[in-house]
Amino acid sequence: MRHSIHAVPLLAVALASACSSNGASSSNSASSTGTSSTGASSNGTNDDTPTGDPDTGNWPDLDDSHAPPHPPPDPTNTGDPTRGGTLTFTSIGAPGYWGRRIEAEPGDPRCDVQSETIDFGWGSEFCCRTRHEVTSDQLTPFNEQLHMVLDGPLRVKMLAVYQPLAGNDGPWAIRSFWDRRTPDQPYNLRFSGPDGAKEFLGDLGNNCSYFAMQEREFPCGPGSDPYCPGSDLDHYGWAGSKLVVLLASMPYADDPDMQPLSCIADGEVEREQDAPWIGISPSELNRDGWSGYHPCHCFNNTDNGQLGDGCGQINVFEVIAEASGAQWGNRDIISTGIRSYQVGSLGGVTCGIQSCGIEQFPADADLVDVNSLTAMDQGAVIDANDPAMSAGPAWRRALDDRFYLFLLDERSRTVQVAVIHPGNVPAEVQQILPAVPNVISREAVEDFLNLRLPQ
């Protein structure tokens, strides 16, 4: 089943034209009250950030181990290499707050964001959310623990999550790893799929969802902080800086090889629901007991809203289903957008099939401008403090393999997303691709940060 928050961008995009950028809302100011709790503290430091050995590349908390040796992945491509693209978000992080769910009884004064008894029809539950204050601007709130969500149709061949071994200035190493060639041997990577599936084979049918997180269990239940009632997603996410590398393709839902894997409901049409999604969400949101569906969650600070002005989420690669209407839905256009208390909404452009027929864009373009209906001739940069821009950067959906990279870097306060054709890997990332080595230098991270595609 599709993650509930995934559909939210439509509500914000509907306020703008079908082919325009979402603006940023003003930041929420932090008050002097509120609480600090497990995870990022009020000064932005994070007790959940792992520490490794920069000399060996090992992780002491993972039995002093490292990711298994692995050959470079085997991409499958048709046609000529494409140009690639980067979309860079700068100045990410700000003082503010979000409503964190805590365990409390009605009348507790800490419930200053939300205090209500929710009636579900089959029962009721008291919801208490308190202001979780943040004073740091270092990538907040995305330095918190984050889970990854994968929605089909997707065909994944390799997934690696890098994190700094000992501070952001030194080398980084693979913290979690999965390889399609050895799908039953993930490294520090826990999956949860349809019907509670634990093994991930790499192919996700239409509307099928898998959550990815670390192996370490998070102690949910009475006394947990943030409060979580207990579910299959009760595991730690990745806190601090992280670089995610995937080799994957996004075949159409009505591809004969994908149709038998479909999770759409009876009576729905494969094409109309064809909307792959790769997202990263706060672990505390996904651990709400309903996989992000629970009405007592941290996603919004605004009452009864869908603004995403709370604990944050990044729709790294999102297709809007054509069932949403020709003005918004387009299975060939992929958007990238950020939501949090800092910005409300940043990026996340979309362009429906009535305006953005894919035939209007060059076949070798990965990054496109949906405002001018042309290929972007350089990488796009969006500053959270000054987000206005004339271009509407989005992605052309690739049916064959691409390297998908997304970096969340505390030191530079940057989120960078890239799509790279395996046959056209630029020199700036050749320390990372195609080998996906266990350890990379901080210089390799900086080279990626400075990369702008197309060139």
Image (spheres, rainbow, N blue to C red):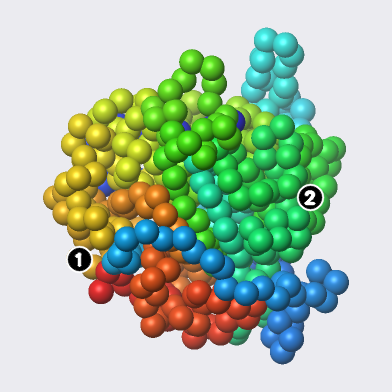
Of residues 410 and 258, the one nearer the viewer is 258
Where does residue 230 sit, x and y in percent of width and height? 79, 37
Quadrant of res 198: top right
Q: Mark 2 is on which residue type?
A: Phe
Q: Residue furthest bottom?
A: 55
> Which numbered marker is on residue 306?
none
| SS type, badge 1 | loop
Q: Mark 1 is on which residue type?
A: Asp
Q: Is residue 400 left or right of residue 301?
A: left
Where does residue 184 sit, x and y in percent of width and height? 75, 55
> Which numbered marker is on residue 377?
1
Residue located 46% across and 20% down the image = 268
Q: Quadrant of the C terminus?
A: bottom left
User: Crowdedness of circle 2 by 10 Å Cα count: few (<14), some, many (20+)?
Assistant: some
Q: Is residue 315 left or right of residue 203?
A: left
Q: CA distance from mark 1 to mark 2?
A: 45 Å
Where does residue 285 sit, x and y in percent of width and height? 62, 41
Q: Is residue 36 left or right of residue 452?
A: right
Vertical arrangement, residue 228 with respect to residue 202, above or below: above
Task: Kindly identify which residue carries mark 2.
Answer: 218
Where does residue 212 sit, x and y in percent of width and height? 65, 50
In primary-sequence order, the first of circles 1 and 2 is 2
| SS type, badge 2 | loop
Of residues 68 and 379, the one nearer the viewer is 68
Residue located 48% across and 36% down the image = 256
Quadrant of res 290: top right
